[in-house]
Image: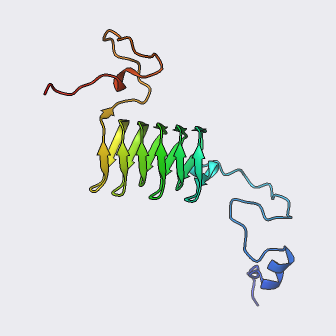
Amino acid sequence: MFNKTKSPAPSPQSRADNGSSIPPLPDLPTPGQPSTGAAPRSAGPSPVSQRGLSTLSSDLQFDGNITGGGDLQIDGSIKGDVRVGRLIVGETGAVEGNVSADYVEVRGRIVGAISGKQVKLIATAYVDGDITAEQMSIDIGAYFQGRVLQGRREAPAPTAPARSAPAAEPAPQIIDMKPPA
């Protein structure tokens, strides 16, 4: 009488059989079962979902530099330089050192230079240091003390004669553009 067959919904009994009451995420294979050989899901690069987000929780303090290509959210405090792919400094987060990332979102406190392609200062941000960014946004209420330099993060030094400054520091950060008093 009925020609169309439907697969039954998984019962609580069948979920208990595989040892988990929570179904697996769609992009992860079910534990204990071999992969089905489905086509790989490379529709486009999604750096956030493939690398994941590492978090330094609010009760942690870290002394030293952090370097990596992944994504980092800081809710604790760091004394040292941070160089990652994407950085979010949460409302309870604090960084005392230079920050470098493609995307930087500041909700907490940074004392040091910020360098990135896209930098956002949210209303709760406190930044004391120079910012070098291709794109910049500052919400009303954010505190910022320093200079903003628009341009590429690691642009070559201009053709102006070089002063006797350390070679490791980029030229745009040592040029003082303040008008005379």
- 147 with respect to 72 (left or right): left
Q: Where is residue 139 in the image (x, y as percent from the top left)?
A: 30, 54
Is 13 drawn above or below residue 20 in the view shown?
A: below
Q: Where is residue 99 in the image (x, y as percent from the top left)?
A: 47, 39
Q: How many labels does the image show?
A: 0
Residue at the spot x=55%, y=40% of the render?
A: 84
Residue at the spot x=28%, y=56% of the render?
A: 141
Residue at the spot x=45%, y=45% of the render?
A: 104
Q: Which of 30 and 54 is in front in this view?
A: 54
Visible residue check, residue 21: yes
Residue lying farthest to the bottom in this orientation: 1
User: Quadrant location of the N terminus?
Assistant: bottom right
- 88 with respect to 68 (left or right): left
- Residue 58: quarter of image: bottom right
Q: Where is residue 34 in the image (x, y as percent from the top left)?
A: 85, 59
User: Quadrant location of the C terminus?
Assistant: top left
Residue lying farthest to the left in this orientation: 181
